Amino acid sequence: MAGLRTDIIDRFERLTKYRLADYFDRYLQFVEQDYPKIVAYYTGRADEANMDAFFELQQLRQETERVVMLFVDKKEALRESAEHWEIMEKVDDILLTLETVDNTAKWARSSITKNNFNPKPEVQFTMRQRQTLERVWSDELGNPNRDDEWIKIAFRNDLREEDYNTMGGAVVSVSYGGQTSSIIVRSVVDNMIGEKVYGLDVQKRMEFEDSDLKVLTYKETIKQAAEILSELRREGNPEFGDHGLQRELFVGVDMAGVQYPAIIRQMTATFGTDDTFKSFQVTAIRQEQDAVFIDFSVETRLSEIIDKTIKLA
């Protein structure tokens, strides 16, 4: 193993009766041969999962945890030399790497479901009355080749003709974006399945729940994101100071001097920085006494609409 002297490994093996060199060789072989196969599957470059690679990943994780326990069971013998802790650091690094590999689906933003690999976000959709699978494919997914491609929905959901009818109500799993507009959400690290596209965030107003920071649901997260972006002002985000509205456009000016076109452009640009949103539109601008209110609507990546109102202040 790179960075470890052979004599240190030999001494560890004598004290623990464990073949550490073989374990390191097995890990290196996994990284070189099996890890690329797992990545290829989750990134769509392999049609089928290599089950041997996934099995080796689980076996290697168990073996790594066994090595970790050796430091507990043999702590009296191992504490004689600080060099043994170099081995512990290497094993900790290996365990972290294996856990990362185990979460490759999230890091690759993949959607893995039974009988199907899909690189696009997948949600469950309830068919409406008199809506056929052909109409679902073209109307909901935006694909014009409904005469042929609808069969993919039937195959994906293992549907028979008697499973759905003109009364509607059948629940099918579909992939938004069709074949022509694959959705890539870079701001979220998770499987692109259903509402997971929105990601998770902690509550803006810090609050503890079950001895930890309160975490919002997916729906709550996307609504909070819309609220935060609408209230963001220039220099309000230290990392991206040019995001948000310039106060000079509406602060310290009379009603006639409020620069509405610039405000709309800047709000549109601000929402454009978050790829969990698809579009932004101002629906109304209202003046009430000395205040200006802007009603707006944003469409999420799952085609859900969020309507909100902000007060310029």
Image: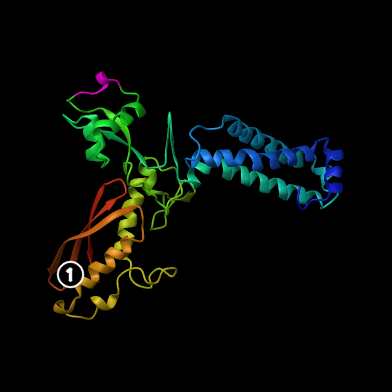
Within 10 Å of disc 1 (Cα), the crowding (few <14, some 14-19, many 20+) is: some
**Residue at the far top in the pictured view:** 162
- Residue 250: where, in percent of width, then height? 23, 76
Q: Which residues are magenta?
A: 160-165
- Residue 199: where, in percent of width, then height? 40, 49
- Residue 308: where, in percent of width, then height? 23, 57
Secondary structure, mark 1, is: strand
Q: Residue at x 39, y 50 (%)?
A: 184
Total residue callouts: 1
Is 171 rendered above or below residue 23?
above
Which residue is labeled 1 in the image? 292
Residue 9 visible here = yes
Residue flagged by tag 1: what amino acid is it?
Val
Is 4 rendered above or below residue 257?
above
Is 288 rendered above or below residue 27?
below
In magenta segment, residue 189: no
- Looking at the rendered image, the quarter that the C terminus falls into is bottom left
Taking depth in this image into account, of 147 and 243 the one nearest to the observer is 147
Residue 217 visible here = no
Q: In the image, 305: left or right of 152?
A: left
- Residue 42: where, in percent of width, then height? 49, 40
Q: How is the image coloured?
A: rainbow
Q: Residue at x 43, y 28 (%)?
A: 115
Residue 64 occupies quadrant: top right
Taking depth in this image into account, of 100 and 68 the one nearest to the observer is 100
Q: Residue at x 28, y 29 (%)?
A: 171
Residue 178 occupies quadrant: top left
Q: In the image, 40: left or right of 80?
A: left
Is 41 rendered above or below residue 293?
above
Taking depth in this image into account, of 217 and 260 the one nearest to the observer is 260
Q: Residue at x 33, y 31 (%)?
A: 152
Residue 114 occupies quadrant: top left
